[in-house]
Amino acid sequence: MQQLQQVQMLELDQEVNQGQIDSIFRVEVGDNLIEKMQVEILLRDGIVEAIRGDL
């Protein structure tokens, strides 16, 4: 019920943080690990719409 109330207060096309995902990714010598760990993935209805940051 609380989630339903929160969703009703959102504006159209507003981005909402859904949490973090732990995953495996490729790193090589010389890569900036801090940048690699700060990637954002934007989903719309479960479909990847954008990837922000360096993979």
Image (tube, rainbow, N blue to C red):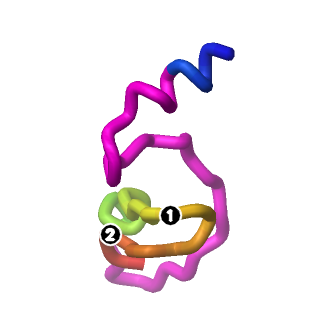
Q: Which residue is mark 1?
A: 43
Which one is in front in this view, the residue at disc 2 or the one at disc 1? 1
Above or below residue 27? Residue 11 is above
Q: Nearer the viewer, residue 53 or 2?
A: 2
The residue closer to the viewer here, 49 or 38, is: 49
Please indicate whether residue 6 sits to the left or right of residue 9 in the image.
Answer: right
* Residue 8 magenta-highlighted: yes
At 31% from the left and 64% from the top, the residue drawn is 35
Q: Residues within 10 Å of mark 1 (few under 14, many from 20)?
A: some
Hey, what amino acid is under mark 2? Answer: Arg
In terms of depth relative to the viewer, which is nearer, 54 or 5? 5
What residue is shown at x 65% (from left), y 70% (from top)? 24
Q: Which mark is residue 52?
A: 2
- Where is residue 47? Give x, y as percent: 58, 72
User: The residue tagged with tag 1: helix, strand or loop?
Assistant: strand
User: Residue 10: x percent and y percent?
Assistant: 38, 34
Query: Bounds of the magenta span?
Result: 6-32
Which of 23 and 48 lies nearest the eye of the viewer?
48
The residue at 64%/55% (across/down) is: 22
Identity, as a three-letter code, of the amino acid under mark 1: Leu
Residue 20, above or below 47: above
To which quarter of the image does residue 23 belong?
A: bottom right
The image shows residue 32 at horizontal and vertical percentages of: 31, 70
Measured Cα–Cα span from mark 2 to mark 1: 11 Å
Q: Is tag 2's residue or tag 1's residue first in the polypeptide sequence?
A: 1
Q: Considering only vertical position in the picture, is 19 above or below 48?
A: above
